[in-house]
Amino acid sequence: MEGVVFSLMTDKTNAGLPAEPGGDTIPEELAVEMRRLAHDLSNALEIIVQTSYLLSTVELKEPAADWLQMLDSGVQKALSLNLELRSYIKEHTPD
């Protein structure tokens, strides 16, 4: 199942596209696992987001300030991708 999840997540043909009514749906067993993984990813990202925020509240010397800016950029990208993943799962699974 892990290979199937990975291939769905990396398949560029459906990336960022909304689900069409009556379109392909993710099989329930796979959807459950994908939701679990997305939830666990959200929890891990929350730790990174909070750490990034806390680091931004202190004055950092160079090059640490640049590293924090790179970290924040990566955090924002990861949050955006996680939201896109969760939306894709929601749009492609039965209610």
Image (tube, rainbow, N blue to C red):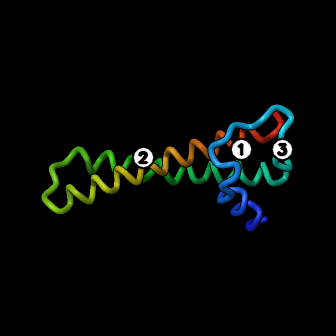
Q: Residue furthest left?
A: 61
Quadrant position of residue 7: bottom right
Residue occupying the point 65% across, 49% down: 15
Q: Is residue 18 left or right of residue 79?
A: right
Q: Is residue 73 left or right of residue 84?
A: left
Quadrant position of residue 67: bottom left
Residue occupying the point 83% across, 39% down: 23
* Picture coordinates of residue 37, whole percent (x, y): 66, 54
- Compare marks 1 and 3 and give the one earlier in the sequence: 3
Q: Is residue 11 above or below residue 93?
A: below
Residue receiving disc 2: 76
* Picture coordinates of residue 75, whole percent (x, y): 41, 50
Q: CA distance from mark 1 to mark 2?
A: 20 Å
Residue receiving disc 3: 24
Residue receiving disc 1: 89
In front: mark 1 or mark 3? 3
Residue occupying the point 57% across, 53% down: 41
Amino acid tagged 1: Ile
Amino acid tagged 2: Gln
Q: Residues within 10 Å of mark 3 (few under 14, many from 20)?
A: few
Q: CA distance from mark 1 to mark 3?
A: 11 Å
> Relative to the observer, which residue lies in front, 18 or 1?
18
Amino acid tagged 3: Asp
Label number found at residue 10:
none
Q: Residue furthest bottom?
A: 3
Q: Is residue 91 left or right of residue 75?
A: right
